[in-house]
Image (cartoon, rainbow, N blue to C red):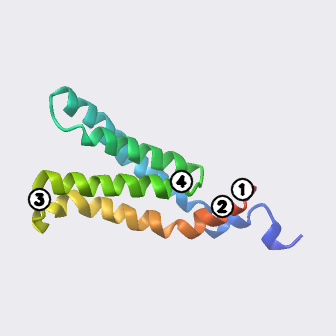
Protein backbone atom coordinates (compact mmCIF):
# COMPACT_ATOMS: atom_id res chain seq x y z
CA UNK A 1 0.00 0.00 0.00
CA UNK A 2 1.42 3.37 -0.95
CA UNK A 3 1.79 6.17 1.55
CA UNK A 4 -0.72 8.27 -0.41
CA UNK A 5 -3.45 5.67 0.08
CA UNK A 6 -2.76 5.03 3.74
CA UNK A 7 -5.33 6.13 6.30
CA UNK A 8 -3.07 8.62 8.09
CA UNK A 9 -1.99 10.56 4.99
CA UNK A 10 -4.60 13.32 5.18
CA UNK A 11 -4.23 13.72 8.92
CA UNK A 12 -0.49 14.35 8.70
CA UNK A 13 -0.79 16.91 5.90
CA UNK A 14 -2.89 19.52 7.68
CA UNK A 15 -6.03 17.52 8.43
CA UNK A 16 -5.88 18.70 12.04
CA UNK A 17 -5.81 22.41 11.09
CA UNK A 18 -9.58 22.79 10.54
CA UNK A 19 -10.23 21.24 13.94
CA UNK A 20 -7.71 23.55 15.63
CA UNK A 21 -9.26 26.63 14.02
CA UNK A 22 -12.70 25.25 14.86
CA UNK A 23 -11.75 25.22 18.55
CA UNK A 24 -10.60 28.86 18.36
CA UNK A 25 -13.76 29.93 16.53
CA UNK A 26 -15.89 28.04 19.07
CA UNK A 27 -14.09 29.68 22.00
CA UNK A 28 -14.91 33.13 20.60
CA UNK A 29 -18.31 32.27 19.13
CA UNK A 30 -19.92 30.91 22.29
CA UNK A 31 -19.49 34.06 24.41
CA UNK A 32 -20.42 36.30 21.47
CA UNK A 33 -23.65 34.34 21.07
CA UNK A 34 -24.42 34.25 24.81
CA UNK A 35 -23.53 37.92 25.24
CA UNK A 36 -25.66 38.73 22.22
CA UNK A 37 -28.67 37.13 23.84
CA UNK A 38 -28.07 39.18 26.99
CA UNK A 39 -27.60 42.37 24.98
CA UNK A 40 -30.83 41.75 23.05
CA UNK A 41 -32.71 41.13 26.31
CA UNK A 42 -31.45 44.52 27.51
CA UNK A 43 -32.76 46.14 24.32
CA UNK A 44 -29.47 46.32 22.42
CA UNK A 45 -28.32 45.10 19.03
CA UNK A 46 -29.26 41.64 17.81
CA UNK A 47 -26.14 41.53 15.62
CA UNK A 48 -24.13 39.55 18.19
CA UNK A 49 -26.70 36.75 18.27
CA UNK A 50 -26.42 36.31 14.50
CA UNK A 51 -22.63 36.69 14.52
CA UNK A 52 -22.40 34.12 17.32
CA UNK A 53 -24.60 31.69 15.40
CA UNK A 54 -22.39 32.19 12.32
CA UNK A 55 -19.26 31.49 14.34
CA UNK A 56 -20.74 28.42 16.03
CA UNK A 57 -21.87 27.00 12.68
CA UNK A 58 -18.46 27.74 11.20
CA UNK A 59 -16.83 25.83 14.07
CA UNK A 60 -19.16 22.85 13.60
CA UNK A 61 -18.36 22.62 9.89
CA UNK A 62 -14.64 23.07 10.55
CA UNK A 63 -14.83 20.11 12.94
CA UNK A 64 -16.45 18.16 10.08
CA UNK A 65 -13.71 19.43 7.73
CA UNK A 66 -16.38 20.70 5.34
CA UNK A 67 -16.13 23.52 2.79
CA UNK A 68 -19.48 24.71 4.12
CA UNK A 69 -17.48 26.34 6.93
CA UNK A 70 -15.93 28.74 4.41
CA UNK A 71 -19.31 29.78 2.99
CA UNK A 72 -20.86 30.26 6.42
CA UNK A 73 -17.94 32.35 7.61
CA UNK A 74 -18.01 34.46 4.44
CA UNK A 75 -21.69 35.18 5.09
CA UNK A 76 -20.92 36.02 8.72
CA UNK A 77 -17.99 38.25 7.74
CA UNK A 78 -19.93 40.23 5.14
CA UNK A 79 -22.81 40.57 7.60
CA UNK A 80 -20.29 41.96 10.08
CA UNK A 81 -19.02 44.45 7.51
CA UNK A 82 -22.58 45.59 6.75
CA UNK A 83 -23.34 45.95 10.47
CA UNK A 84 -20.11 47.89 11.09
CA UNK A 85 -20.85 50.33 8.26
CA UNK A 86 -24.43 50.76 9.48
CA UNK A 87 -23.27 51.32 13.05
CA UNK A 88 -20.39 53.79 12.58
CA UNK A 89 -20.26 54.72 8.90
CA UNK A 90 -17.20 54.66 6.69
CA UNK A 91 -14.64 56.15 9.10
CA UNK A 92 -11.74 53.68 8.99
CA UNK A 93 -10.64 54.35 12.57
CA UNK A 94 -14.06 53.34 13.87
CA UNK A 95 -14.01 50.23 11.69
CA UNK A 96 -10.70 48.91 13.01
CA UNK A 97 -11.99 47.44 16.31
CA UNK A 98 -15.04 45.99 14.57
CA UNK A 99 -13.33 44.39 11.57
CA UNK A 100 -9.70 43.50 12.32
CA UNK A 101 -10.34 40.31 14.31
CA UNK A 102 -13.02 39.05 11.88
CA UNK A 103 -10.66 39.79 8.98
CA UNK A 104 -7.87 37.76 10.61
CA UNK A 105 -10.26 34.83 11.08
CA UNK A 106 -11.36 35.25 7.44
CA UNK A 107 -7.74 34.91 6.29
CA UNK A 108 -7.29 31.78 8.41
CA UNK A 109 -10.50 30.22 7.11
CA UNK A 110 -9.56 31.05 3.51
CA UNK A 111 -6.08 29.57 4.07
CA UNK A 112 -7.77 26.27 4.95
CA UNK A 113 -9.52 25.92 1.59
CA UNK A 114 -6.90 23.52 0.14
CA UNK A 115 -7.10 21.30 3.23
CA UNK A 116 -10.89 21.36 3.28
CA UNK A 117 -11.08 20.54 -0.43
CA UNK A 118 -8.67 17.65 0.02
CA UNK A 119 -10.68 16.37 2.99
CA UNK A 120 -13.96 16.74 1.06
CA UNK A 121 -12.53 14.89 -1.95
CA UNK A 122 -11.27 12.04 0.26
CA UNK A 123 -13.78 11.67 3.12
CA UNK A 124 -12.18 8.41 4.33
CA UNK A 125 -8.92 10.23 5.05
How many other residues sit within 10 Å of disc 4, few (<14), some (14-19) or many (≥20)?
some
Horizontal arrangement in the rendering, residue 75 relative to residue 100 (left or right): right
Q: Earlier in the sequence, mark 3 or mark 4?
A: 4
- Foreground mark, 2 or 4, reads 4
Answer left or right for 44 relative to 109: left
Q: Residue at the location (56% across, 49% down)?
A: 63
- Residue 123 tag number: 1
Q: Which residue is mark 2?
A: 119
Query: Going 33% across and 41% down the picture, which residue do you hit?
Result: 50
Relative to 112, does residue 21 appear above or below in the rendering?
Answer: above
Residue 21 visible somewhere in the drawing: no
Confirm or deny contact between disc 2 and disc 1 (CB under 8 A).
Answer: yes
- Residue 68 lies, with reference to residue 52, above or below; the image says below
Residue receiving disc 3: 89
Marks 2 and 4, how far apart at CA? 12 Å
Number of numbered discs: 4
Q: Which numbered disc, 1 or 4, marks the residue that appears first in the sequence?
A: 4
Separation (CA) of disc 3 from disc 4: 30 Å
Instruction: Indicate the quadrant containing the N terminus: top left, top right, bottom left or bottom right.
Output: bottom right
Residue mark closest to the camera, 1 vs 4: 4
Q: Distance between the Cα atoms at labels 3 and 1? A: 44 Å
Q: Position of residue 104 (x, y in %)?
A: 34, 65
Give percent across and percent down for residue 95.
Answer: 16, 62
Q: Position of residue 98 (x, y in %)?
A: 21, 57
Image coords of residue 34 (percent x, y): 31, 34
Disc 1: CA contacts within 10 A as few (<14), some (14-19) or many (>=20): few
CA separation in Å, label 2 and label 1: 6 Å
Q: Secondary structure at mark 2?
A: helix
Amino acid sequence: MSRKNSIGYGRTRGGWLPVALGVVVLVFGAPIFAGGIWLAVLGGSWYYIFAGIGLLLTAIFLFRRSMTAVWIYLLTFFGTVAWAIWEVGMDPWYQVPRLVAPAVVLLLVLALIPVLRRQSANPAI
